[in-house]
Amino acid sequence: MLDLLTDEFGAIAEKVLENCRQQGIIMIPYEKLRTPAIQANYWKTGRQETDIQETRKRLLQENCQFLLACIDNGKPLQRDKQLTNALPGNSWHQWGEAMDCYWLYNGQKIWDINYLDADGRNGYKVYAEEAQKLGLEAGYFWKSFPDGVHIQLRKESSPLASYSLKTINDLMEAYFS
């Protein structure tokens, strides 16, 4: 079920989902490994053209041609609100170490991360708490840019904590080309 995730993260994510199920909370994975091209679509959504051009310049200066092509070919979703701050390659989704789930309650997809069920429980909070118990990072608890659907293996918000932008570019190109 959680194919395309790293073995380490996949095993822990399965346990998170099982722990939620045991509490009557059904979380359904809808996005696991995400390509840099899809990440570019998400990143461009809600962005000002000046922000996109500044990022293009930075990618050019750092010789990140693969990431630049992702940005240039990216198609923003039809929304006004920004979806992510993570450039292509800078989300743990591209590394197989992140997963997004929605809450299935009474046969309905619940996207409101503040929704309470009939017992006053919030499925996203249960999901995040179970993830934290197993040592994962949960976007539900992020102070800036909360992301209730998201859990990830690493505490660092981005691969930029460990790799240069050029190294990320090269690794993404090698894996996704």
Image (cartoon, grey):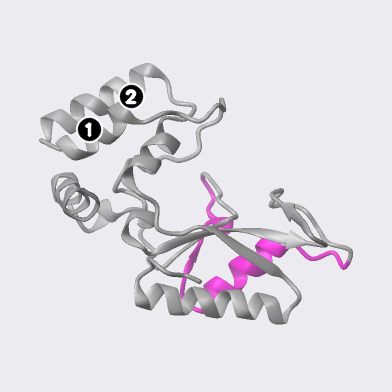
Query: Would you name the residue on which mark 1 appears?
Result: 68
Which residue is found at the position 45% from the left and 79% from the top? 11
The amino acid sitting under disc 1 is Leu
- Locate residue 139, reporting x and y percent: 53, 56
Assess whether residue 98 is covered by the magenta stretch: no
- Locate residue 54, reporting x and y percent: 27, 23
Which residue is found at the position 71% from the left and 64% from the top? 123
Instruction: Looking at the image, tell me whether mark 1 or mark 2 is earlier in sequence order.
Output: 2
The amino acid sitting under disc 2 is Ile
The CA distance from mark 1 to mark 2 is 10 Å
Query: Which numbered disc, 1 or 2, marks the residue closer to the eye?
Result: 1
- Locate residue 85, reporting x and y percent: 41, 40
Query: Would you name the residue on which mark 2 appears?
Result: 52
Q: Tell me whether the residue at label 1 lies in contact with that at label 2, contact meaning CB atoms closer than 8 angstroms.
A: no
Q: Is residue 69 above or below residue 89?
A: above
Which residue is found at the position 51% from the left and 45% from the top? 144
- Locate residue 126, reporting x and y percent: 67, 69
Which portion, as a residue range, is magenta?
Answer: 119-144
